[in-house]
Image (tube, coloured by chain):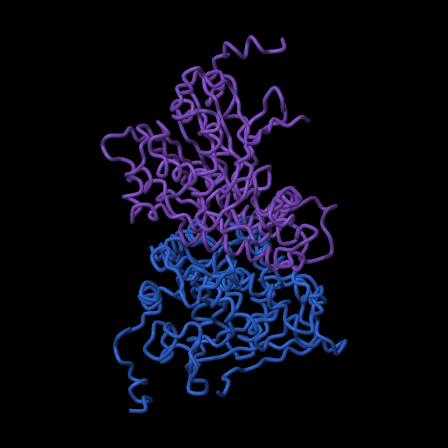
Chain colours: A blue, B purple
């Protein structure tokens, strides 16, 4: 399958909060057309693990991670908007990260990569925006870590985005989530194959265990109860090993973890994970309130999910309350999804209408352009 | 320090649900005096990790795991009651478990130990009760896994206990908790030192990681937020390693995990952990409702905690509703403790009055016997 990935090469030194990189590259994908006024762009930041491939396109037909949300006639309608999705700095899907070659040594950065911050990811995204000749964004959008990055972008560049959407995100990491991520990193670092970051083959045991813990923090007990109850795997898959997989819920998590390994670089995972812990909007202005007061967007949509353990509802309210200065249009939605932190990927029926409404889409109407482009 | 531990040797074959043991031993501790009528005994089952040392005594002055609850003048008043705490079959504090020597081979059982169930632990406890000449118990009490065991005891021996107390427990394991425990076991089993159960030294990396995950499931995000916020460890303890401990919450969990290793046998942990997954009261009568209908206790106290992730409130309600047949006195309490599943150990101010009230204690009154025994 052809890739729709584009690259922006940053020439020279790219300053980060804790160091700098020489000549880094930022991978991104775009959908739709930038209009003549260059005022219809939506910048999308991702969570920890996705690439910039948020949706399929003419070039790359494979489904993206937000396939149901982005496209012609979809809630973020690419007949109307020019959508840019950024592969985070520090990731491993085309953007420079710990797995990339350090041009100064000819070796991968590994643990010599500077300590990454959410602000660095936001800055790298803004460089791409500027490279496309865009001065004003219609919106910045992100969920999870992407929501943190979107918030950071709006704090660092208050004059760029007219509106902001954050989903299941936070103005600063809460200690429970720091503790979960800290343990995930320790699972990777405890894998002997990790070899203090100098692995030749991927430390898949550590990555699998970290992903399993991730799955537990991304979903909810309520969902597992409804989906799996105490169902056992079929008898032919049961073994004599008393600690082997017996319950369907164990099998489900095993399958998800096995899908993850091989796709993600371990050191990149460590850096991105730590970046979330370190994010604290209060670093910009002395308090979360002061930081949020800097945001220039005049319309904001904040969505949270009742069952989210990792970015709980009170953190969404904190963002919404902090942004509600009486001068902005602030929409806050608390969703009763069972899918926890992953609801923005799994419970599309609840999310689509809210995103559609915010972006003034005409969902469920066959789009004019789509009907023209459609093969039949 | 002298140990107050007693042992009951079971002669011959002890039948389990999945096999049998020859000549197993059950360790237990007692407090108070069995009265002439032998009707003042309270049987206490423990959670996964504690020993039978629930409280200090004249013989063993060291604090027990429920020190504030059991003793002269305390909510479970040993001036009035004869309290028996059982070290679970399968554990490693005196009772026969996977780390014990199999008399038939002269080697530790290790993974040859039969698959353990909660019912086996209840049966072993009942053997101790009978060995003491006790036909009727005033009460059976347990929290967490101990609550499951108490429930199993009352289902298997409906004529023995007059009353029942379960705290933060369940009539059957929920899939979210199965998934957490499954991952904990995998963390131990992934430690190369575990060596398929045949370790010579303790697989401490695996145990430490499993305990860390345990800590995350035993407490609550709300508590961590209040206690730690985003506090960093003192600067002199920070290192250059970007993945070392920076936040106080990481340091807290590290300290707890380090305290755990060296005290608990890895194979015992695996067996006890799996026993919780396997417990389903519905195995006795076809449904949870039918199983609970078997319980003979005429007074029951069911306590749950709003922030408990592992044994959530709905599971406490399920027990209380199932026991409420109109003929029994059923007390159900939902506590607003922030300490999650660990609240019965950490939030004593909320738990003491309920336990005291149920056992008709005269808390805060200097006890007659204590004032006699007191050194000054």
Comparing B199 with A145, the one in front is B199
Q: Is residue A332 visible?
A: no
Q: Position of residue B355 (x, y in %)?
A: 42, 26
Q: How many marks?
A: 0
Residue occupying the point 70% across, 71% down: A109
Q: Is residue A364 above or below residue A150?
A: below
Outermost residue on the right side: it is A105
Q: Is residue B345 visible?
A: yes
Q: Quadrant of the C terminus of chain A?
A: bottom left
Q: Is residue B12 above or below residue A9?
A: above
Outermost residue on the bottom side: it is A376
Comparing A6 with B197, the one in front is B197
Q: Is residue A362 above or below residue B54?
A: below
Outermost residue on the left side: it is B326
Left or right relative to B375: residue A70: left
Q: Position of residue A129 (x, y in %)?
A: 53, 75
Comparing B308 with B292, the one in front is B292
Residue occupying the point 63% across, 49% down: B108
Left or right relative to B12: residue B173: left
Q: Position of residue A321 (x, y in %)?
A: 42, 50
Q: Position of residue B120 (x, y in %)?
A: 46, 43
> Residue A359's quadrant in the figure?
bottom left
Comparing B300 with B232, the one in front is B300
């Amino acid at each position: 399958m052809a890739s729709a990935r584009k690259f922006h090469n940053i020439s020279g030194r790219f300053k980060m909060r804790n160091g700098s990189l020489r000549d880094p590259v930022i991978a991104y994908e775009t959908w739709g057309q930038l209009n003549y006024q260059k005022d219809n762009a939506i910048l999308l930041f991702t969570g920890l693990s996705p690439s910039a491939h948020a949706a399929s396109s003419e070039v790359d037909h494979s489904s993206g991670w937000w396939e149901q949300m982005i496209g012609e006639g979809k809630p973020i309608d690419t007949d109307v908007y020019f959508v840019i999705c950024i592969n985070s700095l520090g990731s491993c899907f085309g953007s420079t990260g710990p797995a990339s070659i350090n041009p100064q040594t000819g070796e991968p950065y590994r643990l010599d990569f500077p300590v990454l911050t959410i602000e660095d990811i936001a800055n790298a995204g803004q460089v791409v925006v500027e490279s496309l000749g865009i001065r004003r964004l219609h919106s910045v959008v992100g969920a999870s870590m992407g929501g943190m990055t979107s918030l950071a972008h709006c704090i660092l560049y208050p004059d760029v985005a007219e509106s902001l959407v954050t989903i299941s995100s936070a103005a600063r990491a809460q200690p429970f989530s720091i503790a979960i991520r800290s343990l995930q990193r320790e699972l990777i670092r405890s894998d002997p194959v990790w070899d203090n970051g100098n692995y030749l083959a991927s430390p898949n045991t550590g990555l699998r265990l970290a992903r399993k813990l991730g799955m537990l923090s991304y979903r909810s007990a309520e969902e597992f109860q409804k989906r799996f109850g105490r169902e056992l795997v079929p008898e032919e898959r049961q073994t004599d090993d008393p600690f082997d997989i017996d319950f369907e819920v164990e099998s489900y998590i095993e399958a998800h973890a096995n899908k993850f390994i091989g796709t993600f670089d371990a050191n990149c995972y460590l850096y991105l994970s730590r970046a979330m812990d370190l994010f604290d909007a209060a670093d910009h202005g002395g308090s979360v309130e002061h930081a949020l007061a800097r945001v220039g967007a005049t319309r904001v949509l904040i969505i949270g999910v009742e069952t989210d353990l990792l970015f709980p509802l009170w953190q969404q309210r904190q963002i919404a309350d902090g942004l509600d200065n009486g001068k902005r249009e602030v929409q806050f939605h608390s969703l009763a999804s069972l899918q926890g932190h992953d609801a923005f990927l799994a419970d599309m029926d609840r999310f689509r209408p809210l995103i559609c409404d915010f972006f003034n889409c005409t969902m469920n109407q066959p789009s004019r352009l789509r009907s023209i482009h459609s093969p039949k």
